[in-house]
Image: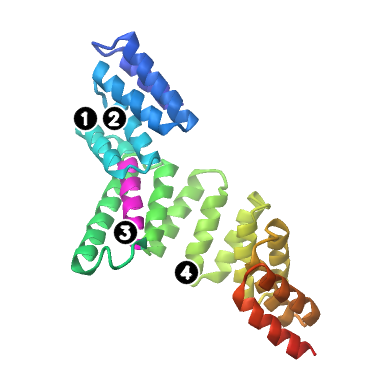
Amino acid sequence: MRMWSLGLLFLLLLPGCSPGYLLLVHEGMDKAEEGAYGEAVYFYTRAMYAGPRTSFLYLRRAEAWAALESNENALQDYDSVLAHDNQNAEAYLGRGTVRLAILSSLSETDVDTVEGVEGMVMRVVLRTLVFADLDRAVHLSPRWAVAIKMRAHAHLVCGNLKEAIADLNAVEWLTWPDAWVLATRARARVLAGDSARALIDFGAAERITPDDGELRFERGLLAYDMGGWSLANEELTHAIQLQPTSPWPWYFRALTRWKLGRRGDACDDACTSAVAGCLPALELAAVFACDFR
């Protein structure tokens, strides 16, 4: 809000800036804050025809376009911001974020639609552009945790685990304890094979958000993979309490309890998982039932 207020103050000082123009900009900002991004775009566009087309106005409209997932329009507006002000860290961050969204959607696209050399080149070019923008944003605002977090996310998407962990370490030094940072670093460490530190990070994230069932499940699953049956049982039990209809915590607690020798409980959990829709649990329940008898 404060940066937006400063932007409005700057607009007041511009020649040709009428009260009607300011009202349109303010309406656009209000609509964006309410989440009505389509209306925000409408008011920002009207303002552009009623007065100066400033980098502030292009930036706000670009953010609205990005929220609507209208990526091409967002990129055009971010380019317009940088044409006015090539030192604008917000615009570099925004453009890099939109490009990352496009890259992620390409990665999820069927091979039939983006294939062969053309698809590979497109991904390589986009990846280069994403990091050019995010690196520039961090360079211009080296203590801006939001930009460093986004670059860490980009590194994860691209499989650069070492760089992602380094950025998340930097964010941890710049901000208060952040569950997203800790959980994301834990996931990166799991992929990098550093399970012991990942378990510690998951635990620290849990202390901040103890009611996050997905986090409990991930830590329980990691403990299971590491052979920590008691911790796995504890975490998966918490996950079940928080997400009782999800089949996978029941499934892995069944496996865990079998390892702990609690065979009757393991059979019950496998059956519950199967009823919740987990197909592998059907076979597991049958195997457990035979062995239990």
Q: Of marks 4 and 2, which one's residue comes earlier in the chain?
A: 2
Label 3 or label 4, whichever comes before in sequence order = 3
Residue 102: in magenta span: yes
Residue indicated by mark 2: 58
Distance (Cα) linking label 1 and label 2 = 10 Å
Q: Residue at label 1?
A: 84
Calculate the distance from the C-alpha at mark 3 to the C-alpha at mark 2: 26 Å
Residue 37 image-quadrant placement: top left
Q: Which residues are magenta?
A: 92-107
Q: Residues within 10 Å of mark 4 (few under 14, many from 20)?
A: some
Q: Foreground mark, 4 or 2?
A: 2
| Residue 113 point in image, percent of width and height | 27, 63
Please tell me how crowded label 3 is: few (under 14), some (14-19), or many (20+) other residues with Cα within 10 Å: some
Q: Which callout, 3 or 2, points at the residue further toward the start of the chain?
A: 2
Pointers 3 and 1 in contact (C-beta within 8 Å): no
If the image is split into quadrants, where does the C terminus sit?
bottom right
Badge 2: how crowded within 10 Å, few (<14), some, or many (20+)?
A: many
Disc number placed over residue 191 in the picture, else none: 4
* Residue 290 image point, x, y percent: 74, 90
Q: Amino acid at mark 2?
A: Tyr
User: Is residue 147 or residue 29 the one in the foreground?
Assistant: 29
